[in-house]
Image (spheres, rainbow, N blue to C red):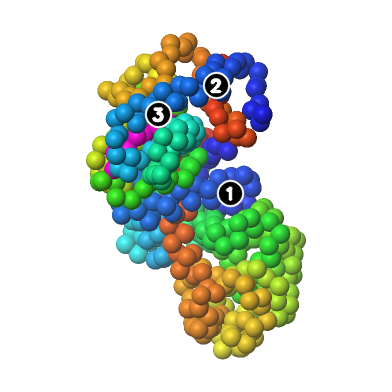
Amino acid sequence: MTWKRKHLLDIHSLSKEEILTVLDTAKGFKQVGRRSIKKVPALRGKTVVNLFVEPSTRTRISFELAAQRLAADIVNFTAEASSFKKGETLKDTAKILEALSADIVIIRHSSAGAPHFLSRVVDASLVNAGDGAHAHPTQALLDLFTMREKVGDIAGKKVTILGDILFSRVARSNIWGLLKLGAEVTLCGPPTLVPKSLESMGCNVTYNIKEAISDADFINLLRIQHERQRHSMFPSLGEYSKLFGLNKERLAWARPDAVIMHPGPVNRGVEIDSEIADSDRSVILDQVTNGLAVRMAVLFLVSGGEPTKETLVKS
Amino acid sequence: MTVEVTKNEEVFLDAAQTGAMIQTMANSVIEQHPNPKKLAVIGIQQKGVLVADAIKVKLERQWPAIELVSGVLDIGMYRDDLSANPTPTLQPTLIPEHLEELDLVLVDDVLQSGRTIRAALDALRDFGRPRRIQLAVLFDRGQRRLPIQPDYVGRRVDLRDEQFIVVKSLEEVGELEVYLTLK
């Protein structure tokens, strides 16, 4: 199918066909990464801005490299060094970037909906690199890409997401993407972080880790975001590790071909033991490589997209 | 036959006529390339790949002992109209190694403006420096916008702007048919 969207704001609003278009396009870009000349001129002359109002390293450098490999110019704009500290509003910042003729703005923000808001006030394409606890579409797409690389079609496959789910945009975007592609999703973790209400999205919720992982094709471990306010959610990292951490003993409950995934950064010894993270069961580094290909595909696709009616309405 | 003929579509060349045309092109390639080991046939995605495969079959019949080097090339990332058009769907690219030792015959179905070939040349440059690149097209419909000319042409055609050439593969018999369709 032909991609028409000018923005990538979330996974929820994409159709199954659109998700597959991104994944198929990313295959082509993964090939580019294996050449001796890893750069193509697809976005030559375009300006891409990394507007990272919330700190991030790996997503930012992944987007940065993706833009460079498409021959675009990229500017990094981070919260620490920016005018936000001086009181400029998000809209004004975006307008400034537009005045510098940015064609694509990649935004990470601690407030859910920030990318959607900006998509209505600027002419540039917007790519959501994580907004609050809402969405992280490129992470979900790279996870789906990695799964398809392992098993082909993921319809009917069983995926268990384990860990901090309530406040996780990675989990939310993954759940939408997996369900749209027909996978069966099970969520597991401490009840405070995995509310039963998530069943209404169409997944299974269990607090029994053995049940959660025993027939899974993929086990996606989410990072315990201990830098955020989690003290009230569970007593200690040690206790979490004891109850839900993936160790050798628990991995023995899983199928021998179950694939271990983690979006990173990994807290070794908390949600996953070092031995498992480094084993050939884990595809953590493939996820990083695939993230670059998927982000190239996203930048490539949105750069040719058309504004939708919604985004043409200026506020 | 698996080919479906849609409305506004008429057979332009049947399988026998197309086959004869491809044979003539293959003969010219053979004439110009006495050493088949240094030759590689590269089809441009997607219809050029069909034509390249058909040429390859004829060449391999001539050189049964040789495993002909071949490849496929998608030019989507190298188009110069990306911001004006919806982004194209990307198809696989597979280019042989050691290009510097090879004479490439780049194959497409129809040559018109020359822009696709310009993009293909840019793309190939990112893989290496072939010894020589030649161009083979099944149809040349003129109206060039760039200084690019084919080395092997199946047929030169003069068509109205709204007429399009569609190459289809008869999968069971491995032959090609050509249709004319209206936009």
Q: Which residue is denoted by mark 3 in the rendering?
A: B26
- Chain at tag 2: B
Q: Residue at x 56, y 23 (%)?
A: B15
Badge 1 marks a residue whose secondary structure is helix
Residue A135 in which image quadrant: bottom right
Badge 2 marks a residue whose secondary structure is helix
Looking at the rendered image, the quarter that the N terminus of chain A falls into is top right
Q: Position of residue A172 (x, y in %)?
A: 62, 61
Whether residue A121 is visible: no
Discs 1 and 2 carry the same chain letter: no
**Viewer-proximal residue among A248 and B149:** B149
Q: Position of residue A32 (x, y in %)?
A: 39, 51
Q: Are marks 1 and 3 in contact (CB under 8 Å)?
A: no
Q: Which residue is denoted by mark 2 in the rendering?
A: B16
Q: Is residue A276 above or below residue B81?
A: below
Q: Is residue B93 above or below residue B151?
A: below
Q: Main secondary structure of the magenta part?
A: strand
